[in-house]
Image (tube, helix red, strand yellow):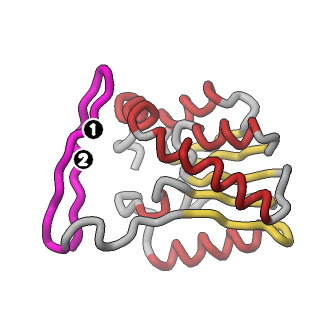
């Protein structure tokens, strides 16, 4: 997976796809508050460039971010120096005792990570369950079927000031 997110793509992801992390932050913070989780450690699996980690630290949580991309982690460490970051597969990393685990932006759905298969996913969920303190929560999202008609591919461009990316979606 490291070959997928080198410096250029890490920059593009941080610049062009940041809205999802930032727009989801208030709702996730509300879920944490509803579950009486107002502080303590939150582990962010697939933390990317640290956008969500930054929101968590602003809300006075301690953060451990995990991402397989060294380039993404480098951006995250610069953005959120008060958080801890680890370069590792979210599917294999050790998860310390914590009040919450998050994995947003469909990270769990990334099939190009060779560590992602059904058995590893079951093991990940078990490790998360074992790491959560009583009353802790796991907040995640996944890609759903039906975003594209089966057997077809959609293509579109996303662009920033100094870059353009072709995004293709397909379903088998």
Residue 18: % across, % down: 47, 38
- Determine whether, in the image, residue 88 is placed left or right of residue 60: left
Are there few (<14), some (14-19), or many (20+) residues within 10 Å of tag 2?
few
At x 75%, y 36%, the residue is 58
Q: What stretch of residues is rendered in magenta?
A: 150-172
Based on the picture, tell me whether residue 168 belongs to the magenta stretch.
yes
Instruction: Give the secondary structure at mark 1.
Output: strand
The answer to whether residue 163 is visible is yes
Q: Residue at x 54, y 55 (%)?
A: 104
Above or below, comparing residue 168 to residue 157 in the picture: below
User: Residue 86 appears at what percent x and percent y?
Assistant: 63, 43
- Confirm or deny contact between disc 1 and disc 2 (CB under 8 A): yes
Q: Can you identify the residue that label 2 sits on?
A: 167
Residue located 36% across and 35% down the image: 9
- In the picture, measured across the screen, residue 39 lies left or right of residue 1, that is right
Q: Is residue 160 above or below residue 36?
A: above
| Comes first in the chain, label 1 or label 2 | 1
State which mark lies toward you, 1 or 2: 1
Residue appearing at x 33%, y 73% in the figure: 145
Q: Which secondary structure lies at badge 2? A: strand
In front of the other: 114 or 22: 22
Q: CA distance from mark 1 to mark 2?
A: 7 Å
In this view, 12 is above or below 67 = above
- Looking at the rendering, in which quadrant would you find the C terminus? bottom left
Q: Is residue 6 visible?
A: no
Q: Which residue is denoted by mark 1 in the rendering?
A: 158
């Amino acid at each position: 997976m490291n070959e997928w997110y080198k410096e250029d793509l890490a920059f593009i992801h941080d610049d062009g796809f940041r809205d999802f992390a930032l727009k989801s932050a208030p709702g996730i913070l509300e879920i944490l508050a509803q579950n009486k989780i107002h502080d303590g450690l939150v582990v962010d699996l697939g933390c990317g460039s640290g956008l969500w980690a930054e929101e968590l630290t602003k809300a006075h949580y301690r953060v451990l971010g995990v991402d397989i991309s060294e380039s993404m982690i480098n951006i995250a460490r610069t953005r959120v120096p008060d958080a801890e970051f680890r370069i590792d597969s979210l599917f294999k990393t050790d998860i310390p005792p914590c009040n919450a685990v998050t994995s947003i932006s469909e990270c769990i759905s990334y099939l190009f990570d060779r560590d992602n298969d059904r058995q590893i996913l079951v093991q990940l969920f078990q490790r998360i369950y074992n790491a959560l303190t009583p009353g802790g929560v796991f907040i995640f999202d996944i890609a759903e079927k039906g975003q594209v008609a089966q057997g077809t591919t959609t293509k579109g461009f996303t662009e920033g000031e100094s870059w353009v990316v072709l995004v293709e979606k397909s379903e088998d």
